Image (spheres, rainbow, N blue to C red):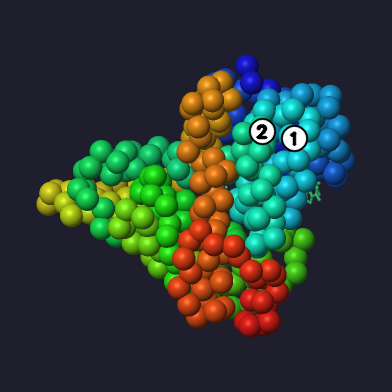
Amino acid sequence: MIKCAIIGVGGGRARGLAEAYGHVTRGRLAAVSTRRRDRLDAFAAEFGVPARYTDYREMFEREKPDLVHVNTPPSVRLEIFESAESAGVPGVLVEKPLAIQGEDFLAIQAFARSARVKIAVNHQLHFHPRRGRLQQQVRDGAIGNLRFIEASAGMNPAYQGTHALQAIGAFNPGAAPVAVFGQVSGADGLAETTRHHYAPDECTGIIDYDNGVSALLRCGAVAPRVIPGDSVNVHKRIAVYGDRGFVHWTMHDWESRIDDVYERGEHVYAEEDILGQAAMTEAMIDWLEDDAAVHPLNIVSALSDFSVILGIYESALNRAVVSLPFTPSPDLVGKLRATLG
Ligand SMILES: NC(=O)c1ccc[n+]([C@@H]2O[C@H](COP(=O)([O-])OP(=O)(O)OC[C@H]3O[C@@H](n4cnc5c(N)ncnc54)[C@H](OP(=O)(O)O)[C@@H]3O)[C@@H](O)[C@H]2O)c1
């Protein structure tokens, strides 16, 4: 049985990580760490976690976990990766977004080139049962040759944009982005906060892939609303078009038209999500047990995705197409604040 731990259980997201262990058969949640003692004790008591720490380094030293969930703000990524590497932690599942801007992106990229620790990014929607079935259908050629992909999310790129971008890659696996043309607006999401999810409020990006597929990404208020109501966090969706038909997934339903046969159905996001989180964790255990079973959400593919987000910012600031891969310029968040604020 794999020994698992979570860093950062004071916020809301850690509950979803812990609840998924009810569906993980080869791993158990053995330890948690968070700096606030009251939150630590409340969380550990609720989920029956035996080992509790206010310092994650001490948790690495004493518990020797096999798999660690990094559930901290994006400003606290690399220091935990480095600490995990020195402590000999074999695996890390880190929450999105992987980075904030060019500086930390480049530092994480440099770290990943030589690190032994296996890292994947927590884009659990890839493993939602319904989305997984649609991804498999498209991979099996059900909609023919891919023509165009269109993905969107109701929140900004830092909060939800990387989910939408990862979805594009999930339906177009193995293809590398080669160019991006972007537009951004809105500075509310660039204001200083302790959550460090800095991003313009809205963005669009037209992304070209090396297999000839183009994709449109829309985040924030420019994204289509998929159900009525005021909530901004319930609109993640993706539509994938091929020369034999299309598939369309949203957080609440799905539809497809393949060779003139139309189908649709509904799902409950929370039910899909807990199963997706568990399946993503099991896939991490596969990778820990077999070097060849590389996790589809591995850090190399996540870095490639994140470079597209940075490319959108760079493209919008310079009013130019950005060829990928590229080296982001310094202080993109500062430049976005100066331009949009
Ligand atoms: N995949 C998804 O569907 C999904 C959904 C929601 C959120 N998320 C992501 O999950 C992450 C966490 O979200 P959340 O809502 O739980 O955030 P949060 O409320 O900001 O909590 C983050 C945790 O990080 C810890 N932390 C903050 N600074 C730290 C530091 N310097 N060193 C160590 N720990 C630190 C905090 O614990 P202490 O202060 O007690 O140490 C807190 O428990 C975010 O990146 C978010 O985007 C993902």
Q: Is the residue marked by circle 2 packed among few (<14), some (14-19), or many (20+) residues within 10 Å?
A: many
Q: Give the percent coordinates (x, y) of residue 55.
A: 86, 38
Q: Give the SS element for disc 2.
A: loop
Q: Amino acid at mark 2?
A: Val
Does label 1 or label 2 sit earlier along the sequence?
1
Q: Give the percent coordinates (x, y) of residue 225.
A: 42, 66
Image quarter of the C terminus:
bottom right
Which residue has dot 1 on it? 84
Quarter of the figure with residue 337: bottom right
How many marks are shown on the rendered structure? 2
Viewer-side residue, 325 vs 206: 325
Which residue has dot 2 on it? 117
Q: Give the percent coordinates (x, y) of residue 122.
A: 57, 43
Could you tell me how far apart the alpha carbons at marks 1 and 2 are, in whole angstroms?
7 Å
Image quarter of the N terminus:
top right
Q: Is residue 284 above or below residue 9?
A: above
Tags 1 and 2 in contact by the CB under 8 Å rule?
yes
**Which residue: 71% across, 36% down?**
6
Q: Is the residue marked by circle 1 packed among few (<14), some (14-19), or many (20+) residues within 10 Å?
A: many
